[in-house]
Amino acid sequence: MELPISSMTTAEKLSAMEQLWASLQTQPDHAPPAWHQKVLVERQRRIDSGEATFSTLDEVQDRIMKART
């Protein structure tokens, strides 16, 4: 099955993605790939060690806007 992605609105695309994700979550064989666990463990290590930094939404939006100019 092929969706008419190029002619879909953003709202239609987001709706399709939400429907696909909801469908995948109900599958008994649904499991994240093994590498996801490795990424999560590394992120937690960086948080625990103080290496990770966090930004507010306003800070992130400011950086994005500055990068566009």
Image (tube, rainbow, N blue to C red):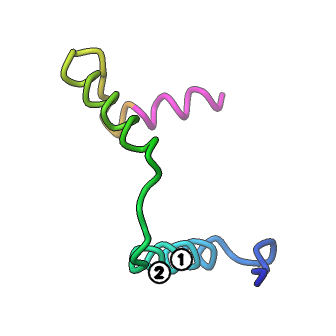
- Horizontal and vertical percent position of residue 31: 41, 62
Q: Is residue 16 magenta?
A: no
Give the side of residue 50 with respect to residue 4, left or right: left
Q: Is residue 23 above or below residue 63?
A: below
Left-right relation of 29 to 43? right
Query: Label 2 belongs to which residue?
Result: 23
> For the point 63% across and 73% down, which residue is it?
13
Density class for disc 1 (Cα within 10 Å; few <14, some 14-19, many ≥20) is few
Mark 2, secondary structure of its residue? helix
**Relative side of 10 to 25, left or right:** right
Amino acid carrying label 1: it is Leu
The boundaries of the magenta stretch are 60-69
Q: Position of residue 42 (x, y in %)?
A: 34, 28
In which quadrant will I find the C terminus? Answer: top right
Where 31 sits versus 46, above or below?
Answer: below
Q: CA distance from mark 1 to mark 2?
A: 5 Å
**Residue 1 placement, left or right of 30:** right
* 57 and 29: which is toward the camera: 29
Query: What residue is disc 1 on?
Result: 20
Q: Residue at x 43, y 68 (%)?
A: 30
In the image as oriented, which residue stretches furthest toward the bottom?
1
- Using the image, tell me which numbered label, if any, was put on residue 39: none
Looking at the rendering, in which quadrant would you find the N terminus? bottom right
| Element under disc 1 | helix
Looking at this view, is 24 or 19 the one in front? 24
Residue 60 coordinates in the image, percent (x, y): 42, 34
Residue at left offset 26%, top offset 24%:
45
Q: Quadrant of residue 6?
A: bottom right
Q: Main secondary structure of the magenta part?
A: helix
Check if mark 1's residue and mark 2's residue have beta carbons within 8 Å.
Answer: yes
